[in-house]
């Protein structure tokens, strides 16, 4: 039996621009899922789901957040290696999506930080906590707008 050569099984090499575009498409899918999970968690909080269900949904949301973090980092590396893509419309929309993903994660970290200490000084920290949640909600809205803009630039991409 003849074993196939490893070179014949490898995927064909793509240009840096095509690789950056594919990574941006993956970032779109991760961002869309992250936004969907955050909205789901918010709806469940509004209707008063059980604590056990909220914990499971929060775990899924954290997983989606982690996936977005990974794809944002991958896109940053891929976009840096593809300077020829800077004239493409998708590249500009992908950069906006990249920035929106980073901003959401930054705001989420801020909310977590303030929440950790809110119990000790509830009255003093309530205004700060409220502001952090509003900023996180604003960042989520910005992410959703960036998702729509990227979808407009790349309508063939499924998410």
Image (cartoon, rainbow, N blue to C red):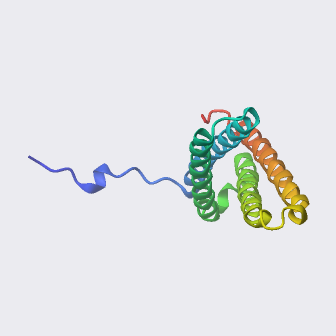
> Which quadrant would the C terminus be assigned to in this image?
top right
Q: Position of residue 103 (x, y in %)?
A: 76, 58
Name the residue: 72% across, 64% down: 116
Q: Position of residue 96 (x, y in %)?
A: 76, 52
Q: Nearer the viewer, residue 74 or 117?
A: 117
Q: Is residue 150 above or below residue 135?
A: above
Would residue 34 be found to the left or right of residue 133 on screen? left
Q: Position of residue 83 (x, y in %)?
A: 66, 62
Residue at the far left: name it: 1
Q: How many marks?
A: 0
Name the residue: 72% across, 61% down: 112
Would residue 38 be found to the left or right of residue 57 on screen? right
Q: Position of residue 158 (x, y in %)?
A: 60, 34
Q: Nearer the viewer, residue 11 or 35?
A: 35
Name the residue: 34% across, 52% down: 10
* Quadrant of residue 123 within the rendered picture: bottom right
């Amino acid at each position: 039996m003849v074993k196939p050569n490893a070179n014949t099984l490898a995927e064909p090499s793509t240009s840096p621009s095509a690789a950056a575009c594919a990574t941006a498409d993956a970032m779109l899918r991760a961002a869309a899922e992250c936004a969907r999970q955050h909205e789901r968690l918010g709806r469940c909080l509004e209707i008063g789901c059980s604590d056990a269900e909220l914990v499971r949904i929060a775990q899924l949301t954290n997983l989606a957040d982690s996936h977005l973090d990974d794809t944002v980092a991958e896109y940053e590396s891929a976009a840096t290696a593809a300077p020829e893509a800077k004239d493409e419309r998708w590249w500009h929309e992908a950069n906006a999506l990249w920035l929106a993903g980073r901003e959401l994660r930054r705001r989420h970290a801020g909310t977590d930080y303030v929440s950790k200490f809110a119990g000790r000084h509830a009255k003093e920290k309530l205004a700060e906590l409220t502001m952090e949640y509003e900023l996180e909600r604003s960042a989520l809205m910005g992410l959703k707008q960036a998702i729509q803009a990227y979808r407009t630039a790349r309508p063939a991409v499924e998410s």
